[in-house]
Image: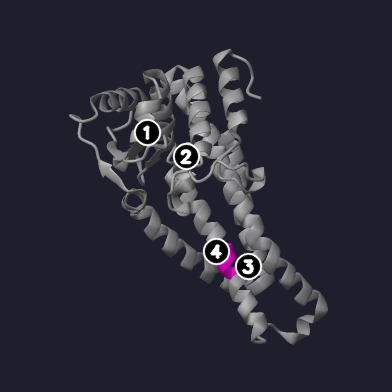
Amino acid sequence: MNTLKTAALMTALTVLLIVVGSTLGGSGGATMAFVVALAINGGSYWFSDKLVLRMSGARPATEAEAPELYAIVRDLAGRAGLPMPKVYLIESQTPNAFATGRNPSHGVVAVTTGILDLLNRDELVGVLAHELSHIKHRDILVSTIAAAIAGAITYAAQIAQWSMLFGGRDREEGAGGLLSGLVMIIVAPIAAMLVQMAISRSREYDADDGGARLSRTPEALASALRKLDLAARRMPMPVNPATAHLFIVNPLTGQRLLALFSTHPPIEERIARLEAFATGQPAV
């Protein structure tokens, strides 16, 4: 279901790009904006693992210093049919984790030292299964494509804004054309951002579902999410906001953002879905 939702949201982004392009600058303006956004996000995708790990202060973990962590990741990767991902540690007492890498062959799992102290083994298995599901589902690729399209929409709006300021738009368009252009300049980037965030939330739900199936203990993942959310609100983790969406729970403040503007689904909903999954009930 969430895969279909993601596909529908990606389609909505594409349609929005076409509408914005035809309204603001014709096909040429939309194409130029898309090429620029694709180049920027393509570079980010190719080097995403290195950039994210550097911004997060993560370092490679040796198997000697984290034998249980390695054992869990190796077992889950085998179950999922994935290559063994690289394992990284972040020196932080705030418990959290994320996965990155442009494809399964370049997969990386990073956890904070705090998560190793807080969670029991079953809960840690659930969290790591969630992160390996992101790798298996190629969520970095999905988020990069979404970012490229959303970026193109924003660039097109900015181009149109400067064009209006310097009289680049045809005066014969009249008040109606000017009004539609202004609406598109304001509304389109916001709409693109909302769809992009909805895609992020959908991928989190899918990773929860995949993690529950892979770990075979959905109740343990639900318990882990409850602990991680509480810790994030008590001990915000000072990370670059650009990487916050990657973590299993929002690491910044734990504040309750308006749902439409959040990259993470509400913890209560995620827990309820996992608990329903554990009892064989339909997801709420």
The mark lying in front, picked from 3 and 1, is 1
Which residue, as the protein is rendered here, is positioned at the far left? 64
Which residue is at the front of the view, 239 or 272? 239
SS majority, magenta: helix
Residue 32 is situated, as x and y percent measured from the top left of the image, at 52, 71
Q: Earlier in the sequence, mark 4 or mark 3?
A: 3
Residue 94 badge? none
User: Count the marks: how many?
Assistant: 4
User: Going 34% across and 54% down the picture, which residue do you hit?
Assistant: 51
Q: Is residue 10 above or below residue 170?
A: above
Residue 152 badge? 4
Q: Which residues are magenta?
A: 152-156
Q: Is residue 19 shown left or right of residue 113? A: right
Q: Earlier in the sequence, mark 2 or mark 1?
A: 1
Callout 4 secondary element = helix
Q: Residues within 10 Å of mark 2 (few under 14, many from 20)?
A: some
What amino acid is found at the position of numbered circle 1 in the picture? Gly
Corner quadrant of residue 74: top left
Q: Residues within 10 Å of mark 4 (few under 14, many from 20)?
A: many
Looking at the image, do the residues carrying marks 4 and 3 touch, with CB atoms under 8 Å apart?
Answer: no
Q: Earlier in the sequence, mark 4 or mark 1?
A: 1
Which residue, as the protein is rendered here, is positioned at the far top? 279
Looking at the image, do the residues carrying marks 2 and 1 touch, with CB atoms under 8 Å apart?
Answer: yes
Name the residue that disc number 3 marks: 21
What amino acid is found at the position of numbered circle 2 in the picture? Met
Name the residue that disc number 2 marks: 235
Q: Distance between the Cα atoms at labels 4 and 3?
A: 9 Å
What amino acid is found at the position of numbered circle 4 in the picture? Ala
Q: Distance between the Cα atoms at labels 2 and 1?
A: 11 Å
Callout 1 secondary element = helix
Residue 114 badge? 1
